[in-house]
Image (tube, grey):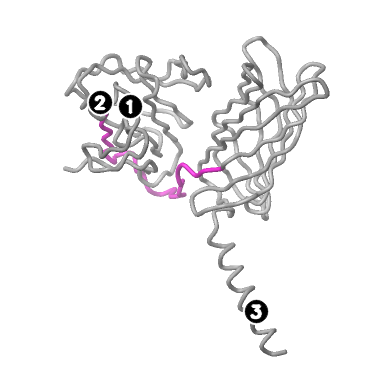
Amino acid sequence: MNTTILTLIVLLAFSGFAFCDSFAIVSPYSAFTLEGSGYAVTTDTIKISNIDLTLSTQQQTGSSVQSSINDGLITLDAEKFLGSELKTTLLRQGQYIRIDGIADNDSGNQASIKLFGRLIEESKNASIYGFTGRIAINDNNYKIIYTAKLSELSKINISPTESKTDQKIVIHIIKGASSQGVGSSINQYGASQGLTFKLFSQDRISVAPGTTITIINDDTVTHNIQSGHDTNDRKNKFVADGKISTGDILPNQSIDITFENAGFYRLFDPNYQWMNIIAFVFPDVEGSVNLGTNQNPKN
């Protein structure tokens, strides 16, 4: 009897430890991507549907963490809806995710979205959720079935008395970035590139407003870095928003970019749209974060 009780206590202790060490405990002041796919179903039709949201968590109340959508796209077959008015709540520290609000497309149609996700499986770096819910467009009411991955992009640490805007951040455009290729290789900075060649020395950063970064073109062709939105179109993946435009950066030349305002930025090259950087710009960010597999350049 005593042995059984002791065994249960040990199992509970280890289960609690594993839960606390899991990715499902979503902390406030962090940034995430939620990417998934599935189907939108009515009695008459089944459409392929995708979700691609970038969100930042805010303050925690009890076991719920509020978050805001920085950038979002939901598709039904070829129809695309921008989720600029979506709200997200992470419940029970990430065990559940609730998404609701309005998304618009270029034709002026609105989609009313209500989704609820349950944690299915997790690793230390990401979690998999099963989503169900509804998307209503005009007279069509679609039942949604998704599988989606929640991945952390950057950690935002509160440090109200310190400023990190004077930190020097240098990002290199890697030689050969303009020639997108597939295959396993090691880039010039010593990082394994898996199945896809890396294009920047850092492709995901988190900085404070007012921070200036330097982009150095180590490629053999001219590049032009702009900010914009993801369109989910294969040929024209991004559309410029006019906030940032470097003009031409010649080979072996560099240019500075200053993030004046807080927000979410996608930086891309309109001539080589497979090249892009994700930047989170928030107050009180401690340093920059490189979350890709590529490394900082060696001095």
Depicted 249 relative to depicted 188: above or below? above
Name the residue at 62% across, 19% down.
80
Name the residue at 82% across, 17% down.
139
Picture coordinates of residue 17, whole percent (x, y) = 56, 68
Q: Find the residue positioned furthest to the top.
A: 107
Label 2 sits on what residue type? Gly
Picture coordinates of residue 30, whole percent (x, y) = 51, 45
| Cα–Cα gap, marks 1 and 3 | 53 Å
Q: Looking at the rendered structure, which numbered label has been put on residue 160? A: none
Depicted 43 relative to depicted 15: above or below? above
Picture coordinates of residue 64, whole percent (x, y) = 67, 50
Q: Looking at the rendered structure, which numbered label has been put on residue 9? A: 3
Q: Quadrant of the C terminus?
A: top left
The magenta region covers 150-173
Q: Looking at the rendered structure, which numbered label has been put on residue 181? A: 1
Mark 2 neighbour class, 10 Å CA radius: few under 14, some 14 to 19, many 20 or more: some
- Mark 2 or mark 3: which comes first in sequence? 3
SS for callout 1: loop
| Cα–Cα gap, marks 2 and 1 | 9 Å
Left or right of 267 in this view: 212: left
Label 1 sits on what residue type? Gly
SS for callout 2: loop
The residue nearer to you, when weighing 269 against 160, is: 269
**Residue 168 is one of the magenta-drawn residues:** yes
SS for callout 3: helix
Mark 1 neighbour class, 10 Å CA radius: few under 14, some 14 to 19, many 20 or more: few
Depicted 8 relative to depicted 213: above or below? below
Name the residue at 36% across, 25% down.
275
**Residue 203 is one of the magenta-drawn residues:** no
Label 3 sits on what residue type? Ile
The mark tally for this picture is 3
